[in-house]
Image (cartoon, rainbow, N blue to C red):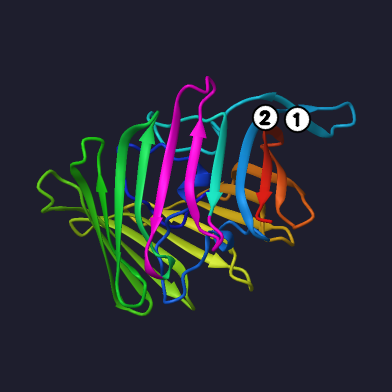
């Protein structure tokens, strides 16, 4: 799934989509819960996602087949350090914020774990990761008086400061992220300028030493869902554009990526089954008309 924001370019980019969407920048005084970000209804206690290969029946219906991992669908672009999990699990506190994320590989003897710590106003303060119970990295977060994120620090596996992201708000419609990622933390590797309209990001420009690296633009439907995004290269040439569609529950049903000449590159559809609370419990991913993966969810609610 395409992202409008460019995230930090960590060497250790191993997160699946489930975990990657949990620590977005807070943009105002009201702090959105992870229930809201993940479109969850009811008091969810934990979610387990298990990945399966799809099978096609004689009537062309899709059913669950053998167990598989979340690769390649949900780790696209993550690089060689990607961690393919056989299942993922999220834990929530009663306020609707994630406290723990666990991914287990196919042999079940190697796992990735993230722990989340919150402070006042349910603002994320620390995120600590472990690989098979060994320290892997740590992030710390700081906020301004309006609950907006102003600094993010990243520490590597040896607990050395590896990257600093400073975030400023020059005006109500602009967010400026400066990323410092050298050994003595003095030089900015690149910066990201995000422009907003009516609270929604409409453009993201990434540059280094004032040189444009890439630019994203984004359009929304009448209820604030991304409907179209465009990627431009460093010379401001259109590279690709992506169109999105959603169901009545707000979950994405179509993702189509086009070339600069408007030819389809990737066509992806998502089919869902829902529980009595309106949360999806099964998601089939069909890429270029070929069933690729089925994600089954086990959802436990607070009583």
* For the residues bearing labels 2 and 1, Cβ distance under 8 angstroms: yes
Locate residue 181 relative to residue 14 in the image: left or right.
left
> Is residue 76 rendered magenta in the image?
no
Q: Position of residue 100 (x, y in %)?
A: 47, 46
The reply to whether residue 10 is visible in this rendering is: no
Q: Quadrant of residue 38?
A: bottom right
Quadrant location of the C terminus in the rendered image: bottom right
Which numbered disc covers residue 52? 2
Which of 260 and 130 lies nearest the eye of the viewer? Answer: 130
Which numbered disc covers residue 64? 1
How many marks on residues? 2
Q: Which span is picked out in magenta? A: 93-120
Q: Position of residue 234 (x, y in %)?
A: 32, 52
At horizontal 65% and vertical 43% (from top left) the residue drawn is 268
Which of 63 and 108 lies nearest the eye of the viewer? Answer: 108
Q: Is residue 87 above or below residue 155?
A: above
Q: Position of residue 11 (x, y in %)?
A: 30, 37
Which numbered disc covers residue 256? none
At horizontal 26% and vertical 48% (from top left) the residue drawn is 154
Provide the secondary structure element on which disc 1 rests.
strand
Q: State how far apart marks 2 and 1 are (Cα).
A: 6 Å
> Is residue 113 rendered magenta in the image?
yes
């Amino acid at each position: 799934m395409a992202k409008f924001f460019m995230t930090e370019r960590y060497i250790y980019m191993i997160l699946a989509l489930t975990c990657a969407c949990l620590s977005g920048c807070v943009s105002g005084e009201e702090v959105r819960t992870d229930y809201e970000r993940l479109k969850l209804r009811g008091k969810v206690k934990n979610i387990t996602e298990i990945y399966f290969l799809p099978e096609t029946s004689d009537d062309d219906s899709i059913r669950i087949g053998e167990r598989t991992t979340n690769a390649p669908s949900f780790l696209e672009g993550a690089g060689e350090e990607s961690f393919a999990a056989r299942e993922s699990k999220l834990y929530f506190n009663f306020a609707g914020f994630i406290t723990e994320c666990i991914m287990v590989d196919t042999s079940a003897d190697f796992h990735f774990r993230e722990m989340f710590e919150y402070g006042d106003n349910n603002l994320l303060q620390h995120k600590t990761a472990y690989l098979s119970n060994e320290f892997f990295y740590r992030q710390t977060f700081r906020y301004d008086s309006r609950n907006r994120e102003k600094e993010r620090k990243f520490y590597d596996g040896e607990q050395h400061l590896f990257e600093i992201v400073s975030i400023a708000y020059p005006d109500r419609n602009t967010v400026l992220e400066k990323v410092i990622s050298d050994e003595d933390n003095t030089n900015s590797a690149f910066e990201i300028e995000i422009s907003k309209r009516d609270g929604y990001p409409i453009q993201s420009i990434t540059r280094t030493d004032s040189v444009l690296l890439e630019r994203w633009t984004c359009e929304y439907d009448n209820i604030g869902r991304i409907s179209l995004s465009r990627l431009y290269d460093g010379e401001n040439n259109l590279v690709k554009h992506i169109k999105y569609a959603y169901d009545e529950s707000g979950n994405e049903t179509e993702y189509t990526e086009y070339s600069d000449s408007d030819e389809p590159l990737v066509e992806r559809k998502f089919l869902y089954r829902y529980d009595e609370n309106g949360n999806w419990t099964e998601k089939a991913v069909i890429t270029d008309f070929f069933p690729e993966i089925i994600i089954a969810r086990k959802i436990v609610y607070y009583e």
